[in-house]
Amino acid sequence: MIDPKHEVAISRQAELLGISRSAVYYAPRPVPEADLALMRRIDELHLEYPFAGARTLRDLLRAEGFEAGRKHIGTLMARMGIEALVRRKSTSRRAPGHEIYPYLLRNVAIERPNQVWALDITYIPMRRGFVYLVAVMDWASRRILSFRLSNTLTADFCVEALEEAIVRHGKPEIVNTDQGSQFTGMEFIGTLKARGIAISMDGKGCWRDNVFIERFWKTLKYQEVYLRAYDSVSEARASIARYIAFYNSRRPHRAHRGCTPDAAYFGNQDMKAAA
């Protein structure tokens, strides 16, 4: 977008584009190896102790030999897109201009495929670096309908995953997400509204509101991600796709008395999951 060889000065080009001149010259630096190792361990601890904030994680990490302060751990948690999952006095904080929708699933019996879909994002460590994974889950059957990887926490890969699931499986009655900016912005909300899909959002910090996909993250990481060290995004995508195919079609699920998510989804069994 910025052309160093153009007759217009770079400072003027930056001004016309509404960006700072320093941003033109900024070269992103790779995340240090020490931070990548720390982020990997933070991710593991977060799965085990989702209530742990930066102070608790600092103490747990120090007991394991990691030297990192509370502020640095908090910075890494923000980069990873995770936070301590606890109730807060204020649950209405949001990105500027983003509307928060009520949670629609309390005391609702979810009994059939495509009644409710859930979306969530998680952090995926690689050998060098990391990516973010979003998945679309059918709540009743626990089947993963689509997924996408991205190196940034933007809304576009969430919209792509949602649209792929709709194209392949039809639209759901309700989509439930957390209050992350990727799900509250107009790009994502507009996709749902355009198709007449009801919008449900978890209470801020209320992990139980989307517990089934949270459980899937733990299963995926311990049975796939933590056993490997992906060298590239393409390798991560292919390996995760293989695991999801196994999870959907071959892995028995206790919620369905040993049936697979595929059997529950396509068999249209009566599946009562109280929300």
Image: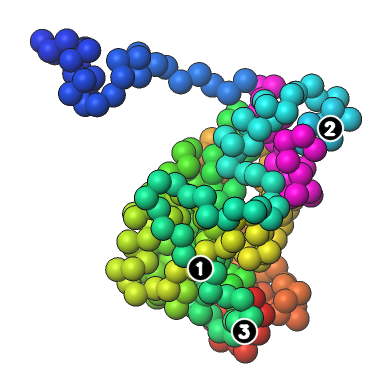
Badge 2 marks a residue whose secondary structure is: helix
The residue labelled by disc 2 is 59
Badge 1 marks a residue whose secondary structure is: loop
Marks 3 and 1: which is nearer the front?
1
Q: Which residue is drawn at 78% across and 48% down?
A: 49
Q: What residue type is labelled 2?
A: Asp
Q: What residue type is labelled 1?
A: Pro
Q: Is residue 145 left or right of residue 89?
A: left
Q: Residue at x 37, y 66 (%)?
A: 192
Q: Is residue 141 left or right of residue 150?
A: right
Q: What residue type is labelled 3?
A: Ala
Residue at the front extreme, as displayed? 89
Q: Is the magenta stretch mostly helix, strand or loop?
A: helix
Contact? badges 3 and 1 (CB < 8 Å): no
Query: Is there any visible trace of residue 29 in the rendered image?
Result: yes
**Number of residues whose C-alpha sits closer than 10 Å to that of mark 3, classed few (under 14), some (14–19) or many (20 or more):** some
Q: Earlier in the sequence, mark 2 or mark 3?
A: 2
The residue labelled by disc 3 is 109
Residue at the left extreme, as displayed? 7
Q: Is residue 44 above or below residue 18?
A: below
Q: What stretch is highlighted in magenta?
A: 33-56
Image location (x, y in percent) of residue 72 = 67, 25
The residue labelled by disc 1 is 102
Observer-nearest of 103 and 156: 103
Contact? badges 2 and 3 (CB < 8 Å): no
Image location (x, y in percent) of residue 61 = 81, 31
